[in-house]
Image (spheres, grey):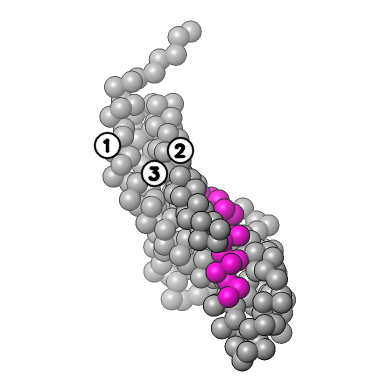
Amino acid sequence: MMLNFDTEFFISLFPIILKYVKVTLKLSIVSLICALLLATIIALVIYFKVKILSPFLKIWVSIFRGTPLVTQLFFIYFGLAQVIPFLKNMNGLTAAILGLSLNASAHMSETLRGAISSVDKGQIEACLSIGMTNLRAMTRVVLPQAMRVAIPALSNSFVDIIKGSAMAFTIGVTELMGAAQMEGASNYKFFETFTAVMLAYWIITSIFGQLQKILEKKLNSSYS
């Protein structure tokens, strides 16, 4: 039996898919920014062993690292909306950003904590000896060095966010995967449709992979 691949339909999918790339990118970039901010706070709290907060955040990180993203999205969109009044009118896009941010921040916080720990503690002691606070020593001296170490892993986390954004269609967000699902269902040509969407995701992640290499090279050159 010969493979019946509709090339014309396959090519016609790309203008449709491109309309939803911006949704995927918006979802991914906003989630990345939120996740990075949350991850930095979590990493610093755990690193400095802040009482009460540190044990709580360790459990928080463990939960979000140890459960599937799709269950977290369902919990936020369908579960929390029932018990928290101001979340009742939350749309799918907001829930997806919240879920992706929390999930990614748990993974990124461990990356940042490891990167911070890799910086010689003597540098913090030297900063404290000249009158810097812990926070200033961390932001001015330690974090810039830690970020250089963490960039490869953080970039991989961003790629994971892009791929994880495909789960947003399960809570009603029409992004790349949602658009593909609709096109496949309406034309009964799932093979062509999902081949096209896989190619689209591969191109997007490949572009960001190249940007990661450029960023790494630039950071390494500044320290060489």
* Residue assigned mark 3: 176
x 47%, y 67%: residue = 34
Q: Is residue 8 above or below residue 215?
A: above
* Precedes in sequence: disc 3 or disc 1: 1
* Three-letter residue code for mark 3: Leu
* Three-letter residue code for mark 2: Trp
* Three-letter residue code for mark 1: Pro
Magenta stretch: give its range.
141-162
- Where residue 203 appears, as percent x and y from the top left, is 42, 38
What is the C-alpha distance between the residues marked 3 and 1? 12 Å
Q: Residue furthest front?
A: 224
74 left or right, relative to 194: right
59 left or right, relative to 26: right
The dot on residue 170 is none
What is the C-alpha distance between the residues marked 2 and 3? 12 Å
* Precedes in sequence: disc 2 or disc 3: 3
x 45%, y 65%: residue = 33
Disc 3 secondary structure class: helix
What is the C-alpha distance between the residues marked 1 and 2? 17 Å
* Residue assigned mark 2: 202
- Where residue 206 appears, as percent x and y from the top left, is 46, 41
* Residue assigned mark 1: 15
- Residue 152 on the magenta span: yes
Q: Residues within 10 Å of mark 2 (few under 14, many from 20)?
A: few
